Image (tube, rainbow, N blue to C red):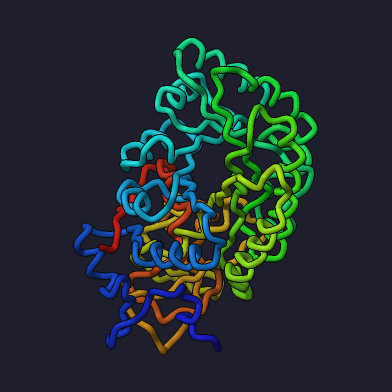
Amino acid sequence: MTHPDLRMPDGFGRDAAGRLLVAGRPAEDWVAETGGTPLFLYDPAIVAAHVCRLRRALPAGVAVHYAIKANPFPPLLARMAALVDGFDVASGGELARALAAGLSPERISFAGPGKRDSDLEAAIQAGITLVVESAGEATRALAHAHRLGRRLRALLRVNPPFELRGSGLRMGGGARPFGVDADQAPGVLARLKDPAVDFLGFHVFAGAQNLDWAAIAEAQRATVALVAELAAHAPGPVRLVNLGGGFGVPYFPGDRPLDVEALGAALARTLADRPPPLRQSAFALELGRWLVAEAGVYLARILDRKTSGGELFLVTDGGLHHVLAGTGNFGTVVRRNWPLVNASRAGPPFETATVTGCLCTPLDRLAERLTIATGREGDLVALFLAGAYGRTASPEAFLGHPPPGERLAA
């Protein structure tokens, strides 16, 4: 039998009593300090280590942007602001959080297929980079820029004619709500030939949650080639190419972590051979999940042990209303267990149990038929990889349970 702890991400451990350690302290201590469970706990040292590893792997000069939709917790954003080169936001609310984190406007870009007029106006007033996603949005943004007497800093998002092979979420290729189809891009670029526009370049995002470095490298090569072709239609030199992200994390047994070193070497070769129209261009990667997922743990307390039909259930005070993705209800076709352990004891003895939340729905399962150190009422359980798409990607108001705690392990 494989020990459950072997699936814990790097950076977590156990003390001599078998209690889970987060940032070197027992999880129970963090819970007591915060005021109870459930609790999202993020270790900023793990985030910093991921950023450092990525920078070592990437070619010199490639910028690292944080897509704050992955986790917009304000204290985490304040830490991230000092670690990355820019923030990518997807709403007016996220824009406000990025500015509150102290980021200067030129380090913020705003993407998303459905921007309200108030979003466009806020972006132009703040002086951030607007990622234009359609001909209609270009027209509306230009109207606001002329009315406000402000320049529109713009990237054009292109829906490429290719997909990121093996992605958990497909963002490009085929019919998509994101960006402008490549064959329509010249027409939109013509609209952006306006004195009110400060044209920066292009944004291309082909897919997400991918563990195959070769597939990501192939998409990056195709992106560079596509943008070089479109450069002939641009209002000016291409100063920036946002290559998107797509970096996945290993949620499930058998998943192999992404080889960022191999990917960085491949990107270096791609950029060394880039076509003449992009020789002076800067490049950026836009990452969310890969930077923060493994730094987060969701802690809940066992309320009850019960058996039904010969199966053991450990019922906790947490659930899908806080961590929807961790229950397999957020874009997962086949439900599989994320790493989950008993945070109060390491075992043996072990048992096979289904760990549930407190909600009155059969969908609320944190783990099914999992090998876990024997759970007692009052024990903590820890669900890992909870640093991305956790609290803000979950139906927190469902059934009226209390909100979770949230804090940095610092």
Give above or below for 281 relative to 230. below
Position of residue 59 in the picture relative to residue 219 (left or right): left
Q: Quadrant of the C terminus?
A: bottom left
- Residue 104 on image: x %, y %: 36, 38
**Residue 324 appears in view:** no
Q: Quadrant of residue 136?
A: top right
Q: Quadrant of residue 301?
A: bottom left
Q: Residue at x 32, y 71 (%)?
A: 22
Q: Quadrant of the N terminus?
A: bottom right
Which is nearer the eye, 5 or 360? Answer: 5
Q: Residue at x 43, y 41 (%)?
A: 107
Which is nearer the eye, 393 or 122? Answer: 122
- Residue 284 on image: x %, y %: 55, 49
Q: Residue at x 55, y 73 (%)?
A: 369
Q: Quadrant of residue 272?
A: bottom right
- Residue 51 on image: x %, y %: 44, 62
Which is nearer the eye, 18 or 90? Answer: 90
Give above or below for 301 relative to 195. below
Position of residue 407 in the picture relative to residue 277 (left or right): left
Which is nearer the eye, 223 or 25? Answer: 223
Give above or below for 410 relative to 180. below
**Residue 263 appears in view:** yes
Count of numbered badges drawn on the protein = 0
- Residue 346 on image: x %, y %: 38, 83
* Residue at the left extreme, as displayed: 33
Q: Residue at x 45, y 44 (%)?
A: 87
Position of residue 184 in the picture relative to residue 12 (left or right): right
